[in-house]
Image: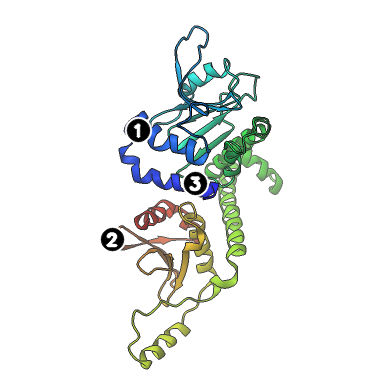
């Protein structure tokens, strides 16, 4: 099993056992130890590699313990502090890590609740743990860009100098990404003024700024949507444009086949349906591989299925009339239609679509 597969396996386990993780000890046993052992490759039963309840006197604080210390080349390399599953990680939780960081040789520290892992080092001041993590891994929503960086922490690949050298860029890269995400949700005035001043020659009055705030928000979302569509179109090729008729359950006679072929000939897959399908793939790939998401066009709607299985409908696009609808399915496979003004509105139903995926997984 490859590294990403081991991460995904642990990710799937979280949903299965989440209701039983009521304590910090349960979290450590069920999630953190498997992460250290199966993902990072350390022998959690060998105290020369993993020391639980690691003690190091820190100034006036005597006998305090950090949950784990990872050992490599007979030196403490990584300190780990654990919190209960579901508990929000805060700087207060990292207080013991801050104290221990300065009295050991560790250059790396991890704060985790079993699902989220925050990775720290000493970029701002030597031998003093930074207040902000340089990397964050969320097992519930694994970012493909994070995976190669986490892999550097594995026992077989561990190189502290390489990790710390890359940490600086990662720290600021992640902070800039968060800022951009905030601008996508609600553009700040300075951000709006930057773009408005490049395209608008008039005076930026309060009314004009308000208009450009809305325009900038729409432009950002459309830009993201267009980028996703281009990537997906390149990945899936021209096959998605081929009409895929709804399969008949039984074939009773040649006449039935002729009628089926006649219906198939009337099916036309439109550009909007293709774009809508690409958006749905972009949403659902957070939970499952894109090659499991299949189109199924019919005369009355464009269906999207999981595993190309009629019993696993994810949603339906009703784009054949002037008013467009997206059909969302509940756990009983009952469809509810919601009106949408444009295909971009499909993103507004991301949570419902992802919840439908969970019904089948």
Which is nearer the eye, 318 or 242? 242
Which is nearer the eye, 103 or 348? 103
What's the CA distance linking mark 2 and mark 3?
32 Å
- Graded by Cα atoms within 10 Å as few (under 14), some (14 to 19) or many (20 or more), the crowding at tag 1 reads some
Which is nearer the eye, 335 or 86? 86
Q: Which residue is mark 2?
A: 332
Q: Which residue is mark 3?
A: 6
Camera-near label (1 vs 2) is: 1
Q: Is residue 356 above or below residue 247?
A: above
What percent of the width, then of the height, locates residue 42?
52, 35
Would you say 350 lies left or right of 193 here? left
Looking at the rendered structure, the secondary structure element under dot 2 is loop
How many tags in the picture?
3
Marks 2 & 3, CB-CB < 8 Å contact: no
Residue lying at the far top of the rendered structure? 60
Looking at the rendered structure, the secondary structure element under dot 3 is helix
Q: Which residue is mark 1?
A: 26
Q: Residue at x 68, y 32 (%)?
A: 165
Q: Is residue 179 above or below residue 266?
A: above
Would you say 209 lies left or right of 286 here? right
Q: Residue at x 44, y 38 (%)?
A: 34
Marks 1 & 3, CB-CB < 8 Å contact: no
Looking at the rendered structure, the secondary structure element under dot 1 is helix
């Amino acid at each position: 099993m490859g590294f990403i597969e081991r991460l995904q396996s642990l990710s799937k386990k979280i949903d299965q056992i989440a209701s039983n993780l009521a304590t910090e000890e349960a979290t450590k046993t069920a999630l953190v130890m498997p992460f250290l052992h199966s993902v990072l490759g350390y022998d959690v039963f060998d105290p020369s590699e993993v020391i639980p309840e690691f003690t190091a006197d820190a100034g006036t604080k005597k006998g305090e313990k950090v949950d784990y210390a990872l050992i490599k080349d007979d030196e403490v390399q990584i300190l780990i502090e654990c919190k209960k599953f579901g508990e929000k990680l805060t700087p207060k939780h990292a207080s013991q890590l801050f104290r221990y960081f300065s009295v050991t040789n560790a250059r790396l520290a991890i704060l985790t609740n079993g699902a989220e892992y925050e990775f720290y080092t000493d970029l701002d001041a030597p031998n003093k743990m930074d207040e902000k993590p340089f990397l964050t891994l969320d097992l519930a929503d694994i970012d493909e860009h994070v995976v190669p960086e986490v892999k550097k922490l594995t026992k077989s690949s561990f190189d502290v100098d390489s990790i710390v050298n890359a940490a600086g860029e990662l720290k600021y890269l992640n902070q800039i990404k968060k800022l951009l995400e905030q601008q996508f949700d609600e553009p700040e005035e300075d951000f709006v003024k930057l773009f408005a001043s490049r395209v608008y020659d008039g005076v930026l009055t309060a009314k004009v700024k308000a208009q450009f705030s809305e325009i900038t928000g729409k432009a950002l979302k459309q830009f993201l949507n267009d980028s996703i569509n281009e990537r997906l179109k390149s990945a899936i090729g021209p096959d998605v444009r081929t009409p895929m008729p709804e399969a008949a359950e039984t074939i009773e006679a040649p006449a039935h086949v002729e009628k089926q072929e006649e219906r198939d000939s009337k099916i036309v897959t439109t550009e909007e349906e293709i774009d809508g399908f690409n958006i749905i793939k972009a949403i659902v790939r957070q939970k499952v591989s894109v090659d499991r998401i299949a189109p199924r066009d019919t005369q009355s709607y464009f269906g999207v299925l999981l595993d190309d299985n009629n019993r696993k409908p994810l949603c339906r696009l009703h784009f054949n009339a002037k008013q467009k609808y997206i059909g969302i399915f509940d756990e009983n496979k009952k469809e509810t239609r919601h009106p949408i003004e444009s295909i971009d509105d499909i993103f507004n139903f991301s949570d419902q679509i992802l919840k439908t995926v969970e019904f089948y997984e």
